Amino acid sequence: MLLAALPAAEWGRVRRNLKQVFMPFGDVLYEPAMPISHIYFPTTSVISISRVMTDGHTDAVTLIGCEGCASVEVCLGGDSAPCRAVVLSEGWGYQIKCDLLNQGEYGQGGSMHSVLLRYAQSYITQVAQTSVCNRHHSIDQQLCRWLLMFLDCQSSNDLALTHEHIAELMGVRRESVTEAAIRLQIAGSIRYSRGHISVVERTGLEARACECYGIAKRETDRLLEISRRYTNMAAAQVGAADRRASRANAYNLSV
Ligand SMILES: [Zn+2]
């Protein structure tokens, strides 16, 4: 989970305000321009974030799994988002009330503030890359990118996705997705049956995906690594302070 990058002491305080929730498939977490009451941190669930057109057409801009949260807009000070958030793959996660987030560690500018702002940067990169990808890259390349993004959101190689779900995500015709998926199956990268896609050869998807996947993935990994490095530094500082305190206590007891 994204908050695993917090120092242990801060995580302990944040944990008290988190509620573990099961997130069923298709659950709408928030709609465009509606007030947002909770922020969600998926652990085993996957959330899709989509733009909604006035004619009802939707295009996904990114996916959120165990290394993200929804909504980023609230973390940046807003009270609503311009997108729809829907549970794409059911599973577990944590939720926190927005007012508790702002009154707690996040509002006080601790490590949680830095971790969530770095995640916001990675989210912006994902959304921007999707915009470029939709315009410049083939359906086959986009399909590989979305499958890889979905894989990164969960621990299994089995994706509970039908061709209809993928077509909705990508904002393209289902037939186009089916044709691209057949090509991937013939190439030995995926296997599709009964509404499930099994990724057989991830490297095959990586080789066929456009540059957009790698650009966004490297930026996400880089920012997460910075958060983890700060956490380790904070833990080392706490450890050093504890050792100094224990040496002082031992000296005081000996005199
Ligand atoms: Zn692309």
Image (cartoon, rainbow, N blue to C red):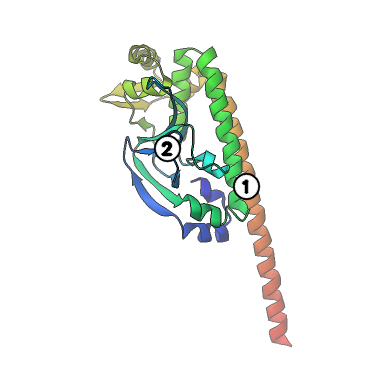
Q: Position of residue 125 (x, y in %)?
A: 58, 30
Q: Is residue 224 above or below residue 51?
A: below
Q: Which residue is mark 2?
A: 154
Q: Position of residue 124 (x, y in %)?
A: 57, 32
Q: Which quadrant of the rendered structure holds the C terminus?
A: bottom right
The residue type indicated by label 1 comes to Ser
Q: Is residue 20 above or below residue 56?
A: below
In front: label 1 or label 2: 1
Q: Is mark 1 within 8 Å of ligand 1?
A: no
Q: Position of residue 52 (x, y in %)?
A: 42, 25
At 57% across and 20% down in the image, what residue appears?
Answer: 211
For the residue pair 53 and 106, the one nearer the viewer reads as 53
Q: Is mark 2 within 8 Å of ligand 1?
A: no
At 65% across and 63% down in the image, what residue appears?
Answer: 239
What is the total number of numbered labels drawn onto the structure image?
A: 2
Q: Is residue 21 above or below residue 218?
A: below
Q: Which residue is mark 1?
A: 114
Q: Position of residue 14 (x, y in %)?
A: 51, 57
Which label sits on residue 92? none
Q: Quadrant of residue 54?
A: top left
